[in-house]
Amino acid sequence: MDIISEHCTTIRNKGQELTVQHLNGLYNEILIRKEKHHADINSVILCETLLNALDTVNIENILCHPIILTHTLHIFIIDTLNETLKRWQQSPDNISHRRKTVFHHITNFLSNLIDKINENNLKNFQILLLHNELIYTINNILMNMDHHEKYLNSDLVQYFSTVIKIFTKLVTFNTTTAKLTLILDPIVKLHFSTKYIEAFKALSQRTPMTSKQEFLLITCPLFLFNYQPQCEYSEETEQFLTSKSVTYFTDIFEYLLPTISEWNEPIIVSMSHLMNILYRLYQFSSISGYDQLISYLIQILNDNDAFSSKTQLKDATLMLIFNLIKNFALLAVVKQLENVTQTFLTLLTKGNDNRLVLFSYLILVNLAKEDVLTVLPETTKIIALFPPYLEQVVQRKCLEWQGVNLEDLLNGLKVLAQNDKTRKALDNNNYSSSFVQCALKTRKNEKILKLILEILWLLSFDPDIASYLQHQDKFMSFVKTINKKNYSLSVKEAAEGLQWKLETEFTLIKKSDELRRQQKRVETEQ
């Protein structure tokens, strides 16, 4: 252990000066000593010594380098974590102080590493973290939590919470693997357990959250929310949710809503995460009961408290409602509520958060369609919202940003393009250029392409916009080729309409103007 300690001291002293090659060499030396004197080395002490040494090493450039990130010594750290979790699972009240300390160090170390996750190192993080034994141990603990209070009441639940947060970062990158359903399944069930409801009811207006409450009300909901619908779900989870109704959460609303004006930060944050749970459950399951929750959601939006204190909650509530009303039956439920249009108008005019204002507008579009412009006090604020989203689509080639789908954005913009006044405002904000770029970037998505072509057709009624489009050679060439390619009839018709507007009609108007000028000359000469 003495030589290993020397190498660890070198790592700590060199710190930021270490290169990948130097650290890899030291790691290999430590590994050789560990294997050679395996019987004499305490894995917990070795892990503690190593992690203390790594505190000074550059995370992004050195520790996250592929050679280092997946090094056998890091796998050893994962194995030590797994062994600690197993001991906690077997005897939550009988973990040594040293092992508790190492548990804390390991979760901190992995948490700092995962903060640097990106598309380039994603596969290496998957190699490091997706170990069968570790996943199975986490699964067992989560399942036990549903039946045994001792895990949630343990002082180690805060470190276990960090473990789940680490895997949450992993699923944020659309990691698709059946292994992660072993974490998802028990987390879903925890949300439908009495423990989740009780954690809400135990929240106090005066005291901070406990580790148990934070785990149930924030950590677990974050994992569920970030688990993307396109990832794998187990048949068990699907069947479980199909048999459930979100009216299960009615108790939470009925218990807390009477005191909404007194909510503190823990309650507001927990309610925001509940909205995200309801949003995600609606996305990937046939779960029922949403119609019975809508009045509660509107009540939250109607709260007159300062917008800054509840912006996150109102934002999450709006995102949920906006997705719910894509269902015609739920849209009808919202429309029947008294003064509901005024609710969203107030949010739109008084809100100081862009996403909150955007969702309010998009909901109003669904409620009132083209008539929405007659009730809006002004549109400048709305028109200024869209460019950042369209820019992200062009730069990142994605169809969603910050929870807002491009198709939904375009439907909202289409309403603005149908009005003469707002059409001119769109031109002043250089929207035509954004639409042209979006059309070229998303040409393989027929729904999006059709919407863009229809919007550009509406905008081309403005002579300045029409002139701009006529001089976009690459775009016009693309529009002309749509008819010759394997696009649907609706896309071809939209392209034909735009082409006719910009070329055929333009030529006809030009000829008509020329004929009028000729007639005028003839009349003048006579």
Image (tube, grey):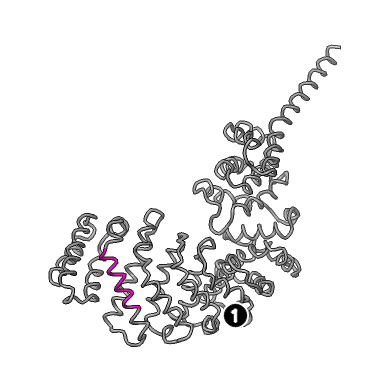
Please state if 150 lies on the left or on the right of 63 as rendered.
right
The single residue placed furthest to the front in the displayed view is 235
Residue interval drawn in magenta: 72-85
Viewer can see residue 208: no
Position of residue 59 relative to residue 160, above or below, is above
Relative horizontal placement of residue 7, taking residue 384 as reference (left or right): left
Can you say which quadrant of the picture contains the C terminus? Answer: top right
Q: Is residue 508 visible?
A: yes
Looking at the image, which residue sits at the far left?
Answer: 2
Task: Examine the residues drawn in magenta and state their main secondary structure.
Answer: helix
Which residue matches tag 1?
252
Q: Residue at x 53, y 77 (%)?
A: 191
Residue 9 falls within the magenta-colored stretch: no
Res 81 quadrant in image: bottom left
Which of the two residues, 392 or 172, is positioned nearer the viewer here? Answer: 172
Q: Amino acid at mark 1?
A: Ile
Neighbour class for label 1 at 10 Å: few (<14), some, many (≥20)? some
Q: Position of residue 466 (x, y in %)?
A: 67, 35
Q: Quadrant of the N terminus?
A: bottom left
Residue sitting nearer the eye, 78 or 375: 78
Q: Judge whether 376 appears above or below 37 on screen.
A: above
Secondary element under disc 1, as helix, strand or loop, is helix
Q: At which x and y percent is residue 377?
A: 70, 56
Q: Position of residue 248 (x, y in %)?
A: 61, 79
